[in-house]
Amino acid sequence: MAAPPPAPLALVVIGATPAALHLLSRLPDRILRRSAVIDRRGAWLAGWADRCGRLDADAIRCAVTQCPGREPGALAAYADRQGRNAEISSRSPGWRLMRDFCDEVVLAALPQEVRNVVRDEVVGLGISRSQIGEGEGRDLCELELEGGGRVPALRVVVCVDPSEPIRPAWVPGSGVERADGIALGGEVDLRGADLSGVSVAIVGGGMASVVLAEGAARRGAREVTLICRGAIRRQDFEASRGWCGARRLRAFLALPPAKRFRAAMAARGSASIPPQCHARLRKLISGGGCRLLERHEVAAARCIGGQWRLMVIDASADRRVDIEVVAEKVWTCCGSAVNVGRHGLLAKLQVRCPTALVGGYPVLDDASLCWPGLPLHVLGPGALLALGPLAGSPAGWRLAVDRVAGAMLTSASGGVTPWERIRQKIEQGAQNEAADTVVDTAMDTVQGDRKRWEKSDNDRQRRERGHSADEFLASFGEEILARREAARYAWRDVGFHVRIDVPLEGEVADGSVGVFFSDSSVEAWAVASEGGATRFHIPRLYRRVVVDQCGYRLDASRGRLRIRLQKTSDSPWHFLKG
């Protein structure tokens, strides 16, 4: 006689992360004693502590009141009892203080079942019907482990971060190799590193970049150069504190998913650093420990004689300054992006129970952060469309826990499961609404720009001169004396558009410009009156474009060609080249 199937667990948490600890510290023991935590490292906060240690960071970017547990003042009280108030700087705790508080206070209060982490990784997930135990007749998740086991659970919470670091297009090769001297910021390990006499270039304008610059200077680096595309911005958190308030969240949740995505991206803006970090950076710069290049970007990189030579250009459209930065080590901190289709577990979920995606983020249930069709909740950056721009921060975790814990403490009974109701609601409402909004917004934007980007004259000239770059150039016969590549340009992402400014040499008339688009490339030629021709060519764009809605115009008074690419969505372009 076959053995009966095991009784399903009440809850399985994937990832022993700070977000998971926020959740478990708010749930009752009757749920926790029938729960398990699965993490590939096999220990609480191991990945988070390792990242903080490798960066040699001091304070973390959160308020002292945004700690795990029910009492916001618990961490401050712990620091006072331990005589460690000096580790709280400008109301932000040090990561070691936070780690010790979690170990000695938060974890110590939890049942043994969730204090012990199962060392494994979830590689697959299915859904079935429970036939045994308290959850009989209810949907449950079947988790497939890398070690070969299967774990049934009535509820699952995914607490791993699905975001990936952005690798700049100018980094040569198929991957970022430390042996070549270029590394992603998250891969750099400053523990025990000796950088005496070494020159370091750091690309990025966020907190990780500044922390690495400080760490390199402390370890004796001969020269530290910090390069960022915009100006360094001071801000306490990634977005305004108002995003924790009910009024702003109500307005956010009233929007369709596509507009939520745009609002969240606008609220986060470019990289920023907290005021205390900004003060340390200014002190470091004034003391000669660091050189800051604001509003500059790296155009190319090459290795000569064991040193990297970075061609840095001014990111503004008004003027050009070329700078060559020479460094033995280059660290890139260009942010991260969420793409459900590239994350192992979430990609499989999307195949098993597809939901709408906007900008790479899944559309979840607003009230419970539940994945449509599954008894599974998502905490962290992946819940941005339901939580707003702070979804990946401690403030966002507390907001998420309120919703997830509330859903767990509400029992489901009979009929269509809550997960199916959520799936039906999103399929019938939010998904269609998101798609409609993308189309409507794109059309509104195109109509609003039509007068500024009038294409009729240029299109007529293009037909007269030919339908390809070769035909266009051939139409000038022997008039073209010299051909040259545009050595510089500036671009920016504006919602559904990418706008490119290309400075031209010499006087160029309207009929002497040809711009040719495909869904993945752009090529432009401008023939000056003295016979020279300037070419601008991107053979592979970062993302595909809508060819029929792309355009250009010649600004003869300023001597520049302005090109507009129509994106297929408002998902931000991190680079121009693919």
Image: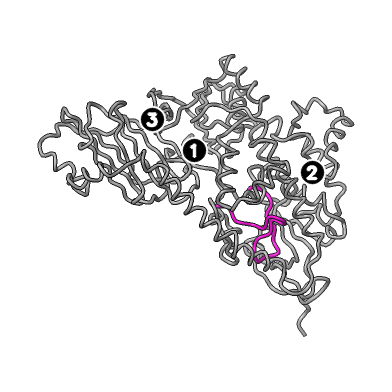
Q: What residue type is labelled 3?
A: Ile
Look at the numbered disc 2 and give the secondary structure of its residue. loop
Residue at 43% x, 31% y: name it: 298
Camera sees residue 307: no
| Mark drawn on residue 68 | 2
The reply to whether residue 260 is in sight is: yes
**Residue tagged 3:** 304
- Please name the residue shown 70% across and 34% down the image: 60
Tag 1's secondary structure?
helix
**Do the residues under discs 1 and 2 have CB atoms within 8 angstroms?**
no
Badge 2: residue crowd in 10 Å (few <14, some 14–19, many ≥20): many
Vertical side of 319 occupied by 522: above or below: below
Image spot of residue 274 (x, y percent):
66, 29
Residue annotated with mark 1: 179
Judged left or right of residue 474, residue 340 is right
Above or below, 279 relative to 339: above
Q: Residue furthest left?
A: 478
- The amino acid marked with disc number 2 is Pro
Q: Give the percent coordinates (x, y) of residue 353.
A: 60, 66
Magenta-drawn segment: 360-381
Residue type at numbered disc 1? Ala
Closer to the N terminus: mark 1 or mark 2? 2
- The N terminus - image quarter: bottom right
